[in-house]
Amino acid sequence: MSLTPALLEELEMLNMFNLNTTQQGIKIHHDAAPTKIATGKRLFEKGMITQADGGYLTALGLQTTEHAQALIAMLGG
């Protein structure tokens, strides 16, 4: 598996979530960059967020985000 632009965009979006609380989500506005809108839709279709325009992490999304953010921290990001 290679690190495609789409995969990197998904990792970036997951990294936006605050893991210290489940009460904080994200909102992708209708006038956001097309790549951000598409990224939200992909994460929703994969079952990682509750809405195509953001929302909250699902259980799968929470687990994925924990791993993604840990990896980013380990790599010094």
Image (cartoon, rainbow, N blue to C red):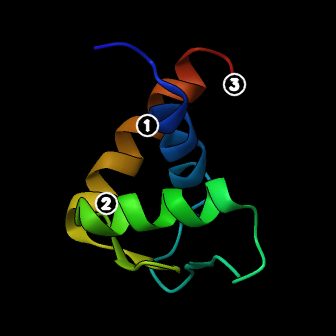
Marks 1 and 3, the one that precedes in the sequence: 1
Residue at numbered disc 2: 61
Q: Residue at x 75, y 61 (%)?
A: 33
Whether tag 2 and tag 1 are in contact, CB under 8 A, the answer is no
Q: Are dots 1 and 3 in contact, CB under 8 Å?
A: no
Q: Could you give the CA–CA distance between mark 1 and mark 3, rounded to whole angstroms?
A: 11 Å
Circle 2 SS class: helix
The amino acid marked with disc number 2 is Gly
Q: Amino acid at mark 3?
A: Gly
Q: Residues within 10 Å of mark 1 (few under 14, many from 20)?
A: some
Which residue matches tag 1?
A: 68
Callout 2 crowding tier (Cα within 10 Å): few <14, some 14–19, many ≥20 = many
Secondary structure, mark 3, is loop
Q: Quadrant of the N terminus?
A: top left
- Give the Cα distance between marks 2 and 1: 10 Å
| Image x and y of residue 15, in percent | 58, 48
On the rendered structure, is 71 left or right of 60? right
Pick whichever, 15 or 52, lies toward us. Answer: 52
Per the image, the residue denoted by label 3 is 77
Residue drawn at 31 percent across, 60 percent down: 61
Counting every numbered tag in the picture gives: 3
Element under disc 1: helix
From this view, report whether residue 10 is shown above or below residue 70. Answer: below
Query: Separation of disc 2 and disc 3 at Cα?
Result: 20 Å
Earlier in the chain: of badge 2 and badge 1, it is 2
